[in-house]
Image: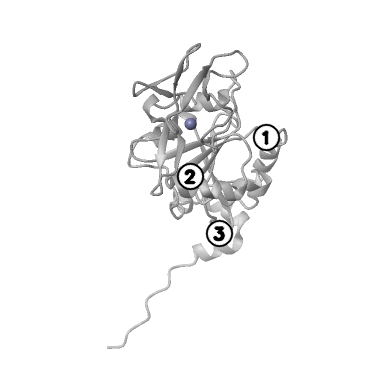
Amino acid sequence: MQYALKNDQRIEPSPKAKALCPICHTTVIAKCGTRRIHHWAHEGLKNCDSWKENETQWHRDWKNRFPSDWREYVQHDESGEKHIADIRTPHGLVLEFQHSHLEPKEREVRENFHKKIVWVVDGIRLKKDYPRFQNGLKNFKRTTTQGYYLSPNPEESFPALWLNCPVPVFFDFLGTVVTNAPDAIRNPLWQLLPGRREGNAVIVAMAREHFVEAASRPPQPIQTRQPLPQPPIQRATLNINALRQLDPQLFRKLMRPPRRPPFRRL
Ligand SMILES: [Zn+2]
């Protein structure tokens, strides 16, 4: 945890400080060592929010892109269950930054608890993760909308757990690496939209700054649990010559003169 409570104020860890856990209100101790990022830990070994994984620099960097009072928001449900949302915006969108593995069932439970949620996934957790994506990228089909791609085989690019998520999943293949050179693959986030369009997964490359902005402002351009937005994918500007070669049948169909309305006898 980055925040704990002292005199009802949210405070960050400082050496030897003690405060209260915002969830269970027991004592937490500041851990300000050199091995892990500075954080609050329960006095006992047990963490009261079993959903929270050990925070890495990657988590912290992402959370720090948002205002501090949106970070580590204590979410309640009707039954009184509480969990910390990594980020909750004032309009109720939860962003969860996920590094470690989840079982599909766990993932579902969290989606149901937070309701309006999108995932940001550490795309380089396993050694094979990034090479798989690079390889799968070859089969992405460009669309006429910049940044939108279709993939008939998203399993070639992404870990199985995330393939059929009912909410958007953003893959971050950069980790905490600082690249000086522009890297068209690693710099954007790659969003896997829920659902399929004519058998294809829809994938959107999105600049990080744009993601932060889009998640922050209402009305939310980032939709959760909506049918696929109708991205202007089909609004193609046709290059007739290219189409003639690519799909002669469609070409002939499009070039056919429009049918006249049937002649009506008076
Ligand atoms: Zn606690």
Using a 10 Å C-alpha cutoff, classify the residue at mark 3 as few (fewer than 14 neighbours), some (14 to 19) or many (20 or more): few
Residue sticking out furthest to the bottom: 266
Marked residue nearer the N-terminal end (1 or 3): 1
83, 172: nearer the viewer: 83
User: Can the viewer see residue 32 in this picture?
Assistant: yes
Image quadrant assignment for residue 6: top left
Using a 10 Å C-alpha cutoff, classify the residue at mark 1 as few (fewer than 14 neighbours), some (14 to 19) or many (20 or more): some
Tag 1: amino acid = Tyr
Using a 10 Å C-alpha cutoff, classify the residue at mark 2 as few (fewer than 14 neighbours), some (14 to 19) or many (20 or more): some
Tag 2: amino acid = Thr
Placement of 94 over or under 67, stated as above or below: below
Which residue was labeled with disc 1? 130
Describe residue 79's horizontal placement relative to residue 15 as left or right. Answer: left
Real-space Cα separation, disc 1 to disc 3, in angstroms: 26 Å
Which residue was labeled with disc 3? 198
45, 104: nearer the viewer: 45
Real-space Cα separation, disc 2 to disc 3, in angstroms: 17 Å
User: Can the viewer see residue 146 in this picture?
Assistant: no
Q: Are marks 2 and 1 in contact (CB under 8 Å)?
A: no
x 65%, y 32%: residue: 124
Describe residue 88's horizontal placement relative to residue 195 as left or right. Answer: left
x 57%, y 33%: residue: 53
11, 26: nearer the viewer: 26
Which residue was labeled with disc 2? 145
Marked residue nearer the N-terminal end (2 or 1): 1
User: Which mark lies nearer to you, 2 or 1?
Assistant: 1
Placement of 104 over or under 251, stated as above or below: above
Q: Element under label 3? A: loop
